[in-house]
Amino acid sequence: MLLQSLREEVLEANLELVRRGLVLYTFGNASGISRRDRLIAIKPSGVAYETMAPEHIVITDLDGRIVEGELRPSSDLPTHVELYKRFPNIGGVAHTHSEYATAWAQAGRPIPCFGTTHADYFHGPVPVTPRLTSDEIATDYERNTGLAICHLFDQLGTDEISAVLVAGHAPFCWGPSAAAAAHNAVILESVARMAYYTIAIAAGAVPISAELHDKHFLRKHGKDAYYGQVNSK
Amino acid sequence: MLLQSLREEVLEANLELVRRGLVLYTFGNASGISRRDRLIAIKPSGVAYETMAPEHIVITDLDGRIVEGELRPSSDLPTHVELYKRFPNIGGVAHTHSEYATAWAQAGRPIPCFGTTHADYFHGPVPVTPRLTSDEIATDYERNTGLAICHLFDQLGTDEISAVLVAGHAPFCWGPSAAAAAHNAVILESVARMAYYTIAIAAGAVPISAELHDKHFLRKHGKDAYYGQVNSK
Amino acid sequence: MLLQSLREEVLEANLELVRRGLVLYTFGNASGISRRDRLIAIKPSGVAYETMAPEHIVITDLDGRIVEGELRPSSDLPTHVELYKRFPNIGGVAHTHSEYATAWAQAGRPIPCFGTTHADYFHGPVPVTPRLTSDEIATDYERNTGLAICHLFDQLGTDEISAVLVAGHAPFCWGPSAAAAAHNAVILESVARMAYYTIAIAAGAVPISAELHDKHFLRKHGKDAYYGQVNSK
Amino acid sequence: MLLQSLREEVLEANLELVRRGLVLYTFGNASGISRRDRLIAIKPSGVAYETMAPEHIVITDLDGRIVEGELRPSSDLPTHVELYKRFPNIGGVAHTHSEYATAWAQAGRPIPCFGTTHADYFHGPVPVTPRLTSDEIATDYERNTGLAICHLFDQLGTDEISAVLVAGHAPFCWGPSAAAAAHNAVILESVARMAYYTIAIAAGAVPISAELHDKHFLRKHGKDAYYGQVNSK
């Protein structure tokens, strides 16, 4: 069986979405990529999490064609494929319908950076794609969802926001690994929830300053990071 | 004892409502029907879920008269009966006072389709009945609740929305089986919650396009469905 | 030891408040009364629920003087005493700071009857007391809290609403037993939560009709009740 | 190993934040101080709670220099240090990003005292610091966070509010011990949640009277307290 450890990591990332309450029934999907092998490992479509095992993870090539696996891959696979093409340094993608992030996506509003929790993870507001056109929906819908995300990031000109809201749909997150992508999905939901509360408390709430945003993002990311134990020796 | 396996399925559907946090104490009820036997199996009224067993499920005929069972059936049975008459293809009905769906029912507002989660399950806004009249309340109240739902769907002209909000009361859901009805009740609550959040984030939020709505509903339902493993072989 | 079974029932009612998530730490208190013995059994003040046992329940007379018990009774005892005097048919009282009911109390707004869940239990809006005056706060504060509730019900002229919101404080509930009082506290919190959601969905939401309110209250209470198994034989 | 019992108490306070749902992943931190030894014990930065043991707690001097410990201390240590200097009677500090308290901090609004739950713990509204300036962020950011809190309390002229909201960031709480600080963090979140609900129910909700505020604060704190068992013998 190909890529045993990647299969296990992808399974674990999917289960993390369950444990954190981000998915209902068979909703959601996480994948990982082996850049060396040019293979993607992704959750099968519509299978119960309770009985999912590494052998159920579907292995595909970088165009999403099945290389190994009895089951059909997640129907969102073409979106994952486009993200892996667009962001050459990422190792995992996670997609959920977590309720607060999805509500922002449904409302068609980016999530402003109202506080340091957000700044610790995402270097800017979490953006929202335009709504897909009828043509984009009619043919290659899931691939066009991915292309809409890629186009949005081309315009934004940043790779330091590892999350996006697809208008009228839900969030996608990514990271250096499947585990990191799932972790970002969990954080995004908390950030989405707090932003929701914030505008209810103060309709005119304003984002934190660029200086505070940079301070928090950079104390966790990049060469001068000093949060956690990573650089402590 | 009649219909052992239907009893077990109906019991299990009722317990699913408990596990998913949709019911308090003895609230809620799910039923199933055997079209062949022309019999309905339904939860008894006001009995604790913790001790409920298949033999407590009440068996009635298609007019709601008890055929087998020591206990009184759910007081909402006449509503279930009308739904089974109106929708000849359904196999189960579930009723809860799940809090977000109930709030939409109390507000008297249909739940707009703000996103693909909704579109995956319900092919249109989840409609709300008119308020019952004094006469409808005075006599045969529970049956009139069912008739109000049936009349609403006659007007809507669709059978692809397996859920309804009864104004000032709560939701009813249905499906091909008792399990499917309970599953729809769980999804409806999530959809109701996200719609609630959506209008709080953007008071003027607009539904998704008809194309996106169709795309998601039809990728899970009907002859060209490609979500899950059902058609994968 | 006096009143062993009442002690156990009161302990159990207090623990029900914990299990249902209505209390934080040592918040909340439930009591029961033996009308025959003219004695009240109430939770001790500020004691951890985890280690509470029947012998910790404090027994007092109808004026709140300790008859048996090493511990100090709940500081809200004088409020319970006034409720027992005012409502001669009740057997238990429960007080929590459950968060949604407390929010309505803090907002100083009665909870309108927006749906049948409310109507199943409370025969009218859940009323809110006026704010206590400086004099009522300065001396015999807890007793004056009880008197404010009693005065409010004198004005309302009904005994069919077994719950009240004390303005700027929190709810008190009661019933035929300590268990019933705790049960009502749990239902009140759910009703308060759904009413909160309802006004967020529709600011101008209107209560259900008097006919529907009566129908639901009377199908569960009084001589013609037909909900549950109580009258089924 | 220095300060075994303080290490255990600090570990336990950190775990209480987890048990009460106040922290996600490695978020949050609690510390304790030994005034006699002039040493602080604080959670390490970015370490998983599941595997944290007393030996992982970092011991520092009163200027935040490590005295014993292999791990890097929480990056918020300099904020804790300033609080210990400013409030000579406190024994513990707790910091979380608990979601409702953080939302008030993000909105930049103090939490008004809308009810007796708040009054039982905090003798006035929970205040919010001004936003930090670019200079305060650029150098010694975490220390300046602490100084902003201290300056705010200098202006308020009270030591009877053991909690603060740092604008655009999150709450800090303190108390006579690490356990008490964590306890206050839990209460603050409940109070923040109820205040959030209160303004949603009534946009113009008003705080409770000074008399009621004093009554509740003083029945739990100070020489005439009569809540709980502390003074009952």
Image (cartoon, coloured by chain):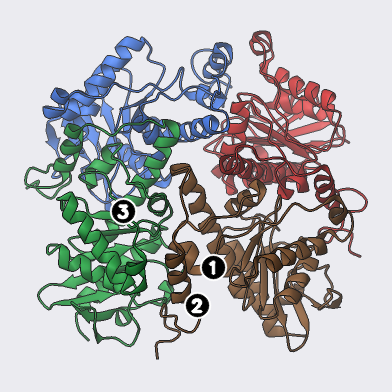
Chain colours: A green, B brown, C red, D blue
Give the quadrant of residue A56.
bottom left
Q: Chain of mark 3?
A: D
Give the amino acid type for the residue marked by disc 2 in the picture.
His
Residue D95: percent from the left, percent from the top?
Answer: 31, 34
Q: CA distance from mark 2 to mark 1?
A: 10 Å
Q: Which quadrant, please, contains the N terminus of chain B?
A: bottom right
In the depicted structure, whether residue C147 falls above or below residue A210: above
Residue for badge 3: D50
Give the amino acid type for the residue marked by disc 1 in the picture.
His
Which residue is depicted at the point 32% across and 70% down?
A: A142
Q: Residues within 10 Å of mark 2 (few under 14, many from 20)?
A: some
Give the amino acid type for the residue marked by disc 3 in the picture.
Glu
In the depicted structure, whether residue D118 falls above or below residue B55: above
Q: CA distance from mark 3 to mark 1?
A: 45 Å
SS assignment at label 3: helix
Residue for badge 1: B123
Which residue is depicted at the point 26% across and 74% down?
A: A8
Residues at circles 2 and 1 in contact by the CB criterion of under 8 Å: yes
Q: Residues within 10 Å of mark 3 (few under 14, many from 20)?
A: few
